[in-house]
Amino acid sequence: MIYYEFPKMKYSEIKGLISIIVPIYNNETYLKECLESILAQTLTNWEAILVNDGSTDNTKNIVDEYVVKDSRFIAIHKQNEGTLLARKTGLENSKGEFIANIDHDDTYHPQFLEKMYAKIKETNVNFVWCKCGTTDKSSPLYVTDYKWDPDTSKNVSAILTLSQGMSFLTWNKLVKREIYSKVYFPNMNIIWGEDPIQMIQVAYHSKSAVFVPEDLYVHKLIGYSSIERPIPSIQLAIVLNETLKILFNNSIPKNVKNAFFRLQSYIPFHYFLLDKKTKMKFKDEVQQIMLELVKLEPKLNLKIVLLLASIGMEFPFKFRELLKRIKRKFNGRKE
């Protein structure tokens, strides 16, 4: 059972103030660029909470340098617990009426805060989101307009469905603090894919949201390799599934369930390639998800090998994956 808790807000809200939460871990290379983009904001009524999550490089010195440079930067140095709990720490120490997030290697457009704040004040919605680009021009992020629906399940489903255009990203959004105060956090180290855990809850609790059709955020495409990702991705699927069950009182609507399982379609490929000891660690939770994934698999041959693997006959699945790897190498493609 996953243990969840709400953020414990330490300070009263200051009207008009925007709190920017920056979780940071070992990022001496890009951190200054990120912090300079905050300093360059045309809207100046902000605080930036820099949560140094147990970095072992020169990150701490850079954080302290910027705190001296501008009093709106607030430093928190803590032990490493992962990005999600670093964000929770930042949220608990925030004072703003509105909450913004930025990844430690990304940058804001100079008018990000000004334009997002103007829109949320004009419309009085619970949150606003904007278009955003990436450092790789060939890989734009799919972020477009979406009409907010009175049906909560449709909005949660849209967060989980990349083609809907709103996306489960936290960092291209400006959210009222009162909404974030209702978001509970799993007390565990989440190191990859933490955004949807927050955003499905933001969508669930929000009655309204509006799109800002401008590129105001730049995301650096620096991700995990295929070797590093399996355990974090399995952990994320388990936490997301549990979070949805709590939100919908163990009765997840069909549209939300379908969106969730489409998003987690890669789980069997990660799970069945783990060693036996690691696999046992996740077995009970993953088995609850696996049968639904098998049902939704459209390819009959893959459906059969996944079903066999789910009852312990993993050889057909592993043989299939081996053939795919050989084919990739033969074609000169990277893993």
Image (cartoon, grey):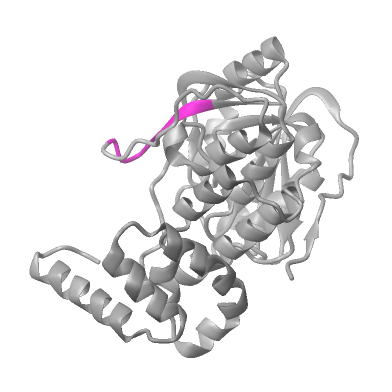
| Percent x, y of residue 46 | 71, 28
Q: How many marks?
A: 0
Q: Locate residue 125: give its quadrant.
A: top right
* Residue 290 appears anywhere in the view: yes
Tell me which residue sits at (76%, 52%) in the image. 249
Tell me which residue sits at (65%, 55%) in the image. 84
Residue 134 counted in the magenta span: yes
| Percent x, y of residue 34 | 52, 40
Residue 215 counted in the magenta span: no
Q: Is residue 40 above or below residue 326?
A: above
Q: Locate residue 230: give its quadrant.
A: bottom left
Report the quarter where the N terminus lies.
bottom right
Compared across the picture, whether 133 is left or right of 20 comes to: left
Q: Is residue 163 above or below residue 246?
A: above
| Percent x, y of residue 310 | 45, 78
Compared across the picture, whether 203 is left or right of 141 comes to: right
Q: Is residue 26 above or below residue 117?
A: below
* Residue 111 appears anywhere in the view: no
State the extent of the magenta-drawn residues as a range.
Answer: 130-137
Q: Locate residue 122: give its quadrant.
A: top right
Tell me which residue sits at (67%, 60%) in the image. 242
